[in-house]
Amino acid sequence: MKLGSLFDGIGGFPLAAVNVGITPVWASEIEKSPVSITMRHFSDMEHLGDIRKIDGGEIQPVDIITFGSPCQDLSIAGLRAGLDGERSGLFNQALRVIREMRIATGNKYPGRIVWENVPGAFSSNRGGDFQTVIEEIAKTAEPGISVPRPSEKFGWLAAGCVMGDNFSLAWRVLDAQYFGVPQRRRRIFLVADFTSRRAGEILFKSESGAGNIEKGGEEKKEIARTSESGVKSDGQFYVDLGHRSSRIQINPETSVTLMGQGGGVGAKTGLYCLPFVCNGFGDYKQDDVGKTLMARDDITTCDLIACHYSVRRLTPLECERLQGYPDGWTEFGHDGRRISDNQRYRALGNSVAVPCVVSVLSGMND
């Protein structure tokens, strides 16, 4: 099977594809550093550039097209402009490319697509944006189909499906912390199968054990220790560094969600509040949360949480591990030049958690 990746970033979808025996053949991305990083790892993959300049009927047909379309306008942390926003509106460009390819190939390719986005899509424009997403994808297989919107009282469920005569689509919220990486990162994954009614089977029966990625343990139910800054009902702390935009959310069991955009001192710099223990000799050592590195002189002790946490900046290597990438994945571009830390933080924050994608794609290679 062959895969094409739109809004590719640093090659998260192609990397997951290779993990389960699917061949990535092309990718579309416009950010310079992510393109260079991906070219380094996938030198044989064609790079198509700006999606707005791609004709889906002229590029190489593929079995699967993946697209984690920009989510800033759908996120609760953003301006919530929805699909009418400049960035999230690129979803329509992805559908255009998919439909052009299907028309050019007699509706044979792509047979399946995967869409990934933030859970904020469920509530954006009072649920209307997610309705548009699934309805427009369904229309790719069955023009004229109408998908009803749930009542505003209950909203969209975290999982569901739409079944047609010979097509199907299903969605499900996956949290990266249960797929082998110590990070709370909830994302919607939607699978559409334009040739059969198997989308639900693919998405709900797939397991994260594909490849060498281990499934995480069950969710911890205990409530975290209290702190002077505060504790939320779901057990997450927040540390207020002086003003609202500098608030950092943490969890006693996992690292906070990586962010590539947004306000706050931790959003673009890799600044996190992580557990540490004292070794009895005056030195501090990060515990194994996030597979973090030794931290001594670079740690600033935080007494807000009974001296059990410290605020410091994660290294790009640690961010790679939180997203499930191999060590050093973002360190160099295809020309051998080193990628700046700021660019690495941004690229990783905007990327996918690879183990989640492996789980989804593993159900397709049959």
Image (cartoon, rainbow, N blue to C red):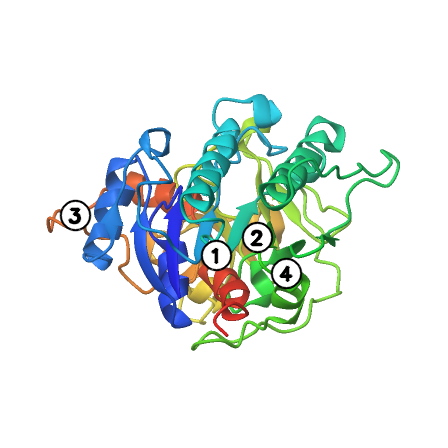
Q: Earlier in the sequence, mark 4 or mark 1?
A: 4
Q: Nearer the viewer, mark 1 or mark 3?
A: 1
Q: In the structure shown, which secondary structural element does the residue marked by tag 3 occupy? A: loop
How many angstroms separate mark 2 from mark 4 (CA)? Answer: 23 Å
* Near-viewer residue (246 or 149): 149
Give the amino acid at mark 4.
Ala
Please, what is the three-letter code of the amino acid marked with disc 3?
Answer: Arg
Viewer-nearest residue: 206 or 314: 206
Q: Which residue is mark 1?
A: 353
Q: Is disc 4 in contact with disc 1, using a CB cutoff of under 8 Å?
A: no
Mark 4 vs mark 1, CA separation in Å:
21 Å
Q: Which mark is residue 185?
A: 2
Q: Quadrant location of residue 33?
A: top left
Residue 319 seen: no
Which x, y percent locates residue 182?
53, 63
Residue 195 at what x, y percent from top left? 58, 58
The numbered disc on residue 293 is none
The tag earlier along the polypeptide, 1 or 2, is: 2
The kind of secondary structure element at disc 4 is: helix
Marks 2/3: CA distance? 28 Å
Q: CA distance from mark 4 to mark 3?
A: 41 Å
**Residue 77 as seen in the image, left or right of residue 146:** left
Q: Nearer the viewer, residue 5 or 246?
A: 5
198 is higher (above) or lower (below) than 123 = below
The local crowd at label 4, few if under 14, some if 14 to 19, many if 20 or more residues have their Cα within 10 Å, is many
Residue contact between numbered discs 2 and 3, judged by CB atoms under 8 Å: no
On the image, numbered disc 3 is attached to which residue?
A: 338
Checking the image for residue 199, the label placed there is 4
Write the residue at 56% across / 74% down.
215
Circles 1 and 2: CB atoms closer than 8 Å: yes
Query: The residue tagged with tag 2: helix, strand or loop?
Result: loop
What is the secondary structure assignment of the residue under circle 1? loop
